[in-house]
Amino acid sequence: MCTALSMNGKRHYFGRNLDLEYDFGQEVVVTPRKYPFAFSNGQHVSDHYAFVGMASVIDGYPMYADAVNEHGLGMAGLHFALSGAYPSAAPQAAVDVAPFEFVSWILSQCASLAEALERLSTLRLTDIPFSSSVPNSVLHWMLADSTGSAVVEPLPDGLVVKRDPYNVLTNDPPFSYHATNLNFYLNLTPEPPVNRFCAADDLQAMGKGTGAFGLPGDCSSASRFIRIAFNSGNSVCGAEDQAEMTQFFHLLDSVASVRGDVRTEEGKYFYTRYSSCMAGSCYYYKTYKNNQITAIDMNKTDLGSEALSIYPLVDTQQVHAGN
């Protein structure tokens, strides 16, 4: 259960809610330009673009859930286990990339969505795990920059890449389902509703907001896709400093899950572990336990270094004393 969002304003904003029943050792990690990547296909890259995002670092290797590079290309992986599938081997003409390194492979080498789409035309994700004790999660990904968004899905018939005009993504079913499902909500509007029910002239709206009556409010992937697409498509930002970044987090809040909403078969709870917003060189985030926004600016690190910069999450509630 996750939701990703791309939004243009004075700057481009990209981010996500990550909803899970467990933490995965996530930290904010800056990968500098000289960090040496040895990809599973034998490709070695030690001079590349820098990027910052949320990752789990194991044996010195960053496995990113979401990140943005220094040129503004963002990428996020979302749970896709019901529909997705990784082949065990790639055709001879394809470039093999393992799912755990996919974000790093793209963001280290592509400065734009257009460049990423070109590289994806010869790529196939293969089921090569990080190690025997760290299997791959089945994901699909959203890529975005200021020019637009795209979705990358490993389906049983192969890798499918589609432009995403709605600039949002959730989980299963595949993106094509969500795009079709939007057509059932064409009547929703932020405006006061107009009576189309019958000719009676005594019908009236029962309060503000009823133009969007029927907007789904549950935590399912299909409902979150509709809700975030409606909210972001009708979003209006203020002109003051940080208004757009603040609005971005409000949009993610509109599809966030609180602890107790969703319980697994094992009795554990899915909820929004963190929300992120990436803009320029900054990675902004807040966690379930701390809803004050924290910022990590990769330009304040040594981007010419070979060493990762790792920042543990500020995960206890921060309260501003008003008197």
Image (tube, rainbow, N blue to C red):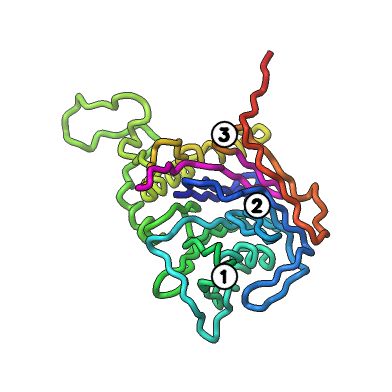
How busy is the neighbourhood of tag 3: few (under 14 within 10 Å), some, or many (20 plus)? few
Tell me which numbered mark, 3 or 2, is placed earlier along the sequence: 2
Q: Is residue 288 left or right of residue 228?
A: right
x and y percent of residue 187 in the render? 31, 43
Label tally: 3
Badge 3 amino acid: Lys
Badge 2 amino acid: Gly
Residue 275 in the magenta stretch? The answer is yes
How busy is the neighbourhood of tag 2: few (under 14 within 10 Å), some, or many (20 plus)? many
x and y percent of residue 254 in the render? 46, 38
Q: Is residue 116 visible?
A: yes
Q: What residue would you read off at disc 2? A: 53
Q: What residue would you read off at disc 3? A: 289
**239 vs 70, nearest the viewer:** 70
**Between marks 3 and 2, how big is the CA–CA gap?**
19 Å
Residue 14 in the magenta stretch? The answer is no
Name the main secondary structure of what is drawn in magenta: strand
Magenta segment: 265-286
Q: Is residue 190 left or right of residue 76?
A: left
